[in-house]
Image (cartoon, grey):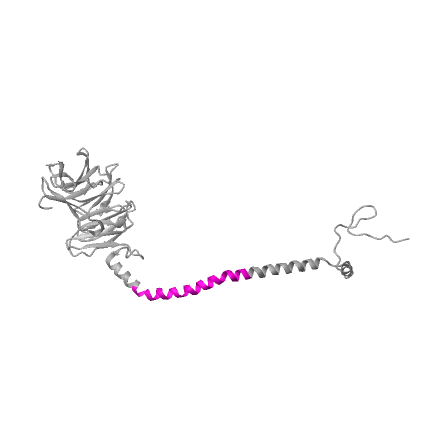
Amino acid sequence: GADGTAAAWRAGADGTEPVALGSADLPSAAAVGVCVHPTGKYAAVVAPEGVHVLSLAEGACGVLLSFAEGAAGHAHTCAGLHPDGLILAAGGDDGNIRLWDLRTQAPVATLEGHAAAVTALAFSENGYHVASAAQDGAVFVWDLRKLKIVARLNAGADNPPKAPPFVEGPVVSVCFDPSGKTLAYVSRPGEIVLTAVKDWGTAVRIPTGHGKDVTALRFMGGGAWIATAAKDRAIKFWGVPEEATEDTPMEDVATADAKKAGDNTANDGDNTAAKEPTKEGGDAASEEPKKKDGDAEEKVETAKETEEKEKGDNSVPEKGKEEEDAAGKRKAPSSPPKTPEGRTSRRTRRTPRK
């Protein structure tokens, strides 16, 4: 806090009150950033003049070690911790971002590029990128493997050809979603920008409507919604509506829930009525197999009658065949008749007697 004291709590289970782990006096001024280690046993507290590592053991909360104290020519303004818990980043009022190895407390790199004080930092889930925001509104995305800027957003002429919408004022908070595919940032006046990582032109701007300056933004619920906090003492939650469009990609979750509850109440009568035909449909379905069985029996009987009829037609008496031949219905011979000389021809000529 502003009094130079760091306090720690453990969240209560099932909605119970949080448990106080303890507090510790910092060797330097008030903290500008706190990052909890993935193990939950430690926290890195960044103050303007140094970095302090605290133990979060219940009843034994205290400063374990301090480093980067008395940095010349700059003051720390914000902090971020790598997902593996090994690299700590701190932004400075000189526009630079400094990285330390927490195991050795040694500096490993300095990222230079911002023209104003750094206001916010956030690592991607896979740890390959870090996003930074500055007092002049610029948002940079850095590749930590190459230690260089891969995207300049909200930076005027330095924007990529297809850039997210521009927001006025300083950007005070920046955050990647858990998948690392979406980046969100919010300006102090209260405008959120959501943009697809690498496809920066796929973006949307959302006014929060806070009454005072916005101070923080976070993805929550596995990335399904966003929370914003402001000096008006309000925390707003933003989620994607079931039927989202480009014009209304997100909405206040509280408003959406109230609307949905009203729709469900109005549809209770329709849902009750919709259940009635189901019973009739069930009776019809139970009679369907019987109908199909009857059709099968009829088909079998018809087949038997047809077979008997064909047998009767094939057993024609010889006398009847002769009568058919006499009527001119005799079948053509299978081969042409032979002449006396053994040659075949299609027609036999009679030689007149002399």
Residue 97 on image: x %, y %: 18, 39
Q: Name which quarter of the figure residue 305 lies in.
A: bottom right
Q: Residue at x 25, y 56 (%)?
A: 253
Residue 256 on image: x %, y %: 26, 59
Give left or right: position of 264 versus 212: right
Q: Name which quarter of the figure residue 93 lies in.
A: top left
Depth check, front residue: 271 or 253: 271
| Residue 267 higher or lower than 14, as above or below | below
Q: Name which quarter of the figure residue 245 lies in.
A: bottom left
Residue 116 visible (yes or no): no
Q: Residue at x 50, y 60 (%)?
A: 289
Depth check, front residue: 281 or 148: 281
Q: Residue at x 69, y 58 (%)?
A: 311
What residue range appears in magenta? Answer: 265-294
| Residue 262 higher or lower than 72, as above or below | below
| Residue 130 higher or lower than 217, as above or below | above
| Residue 321 higher or lower than 116, as above or below | below
Residue 19 visible (yes or no): yes
Most common SS among magenta residues: helix
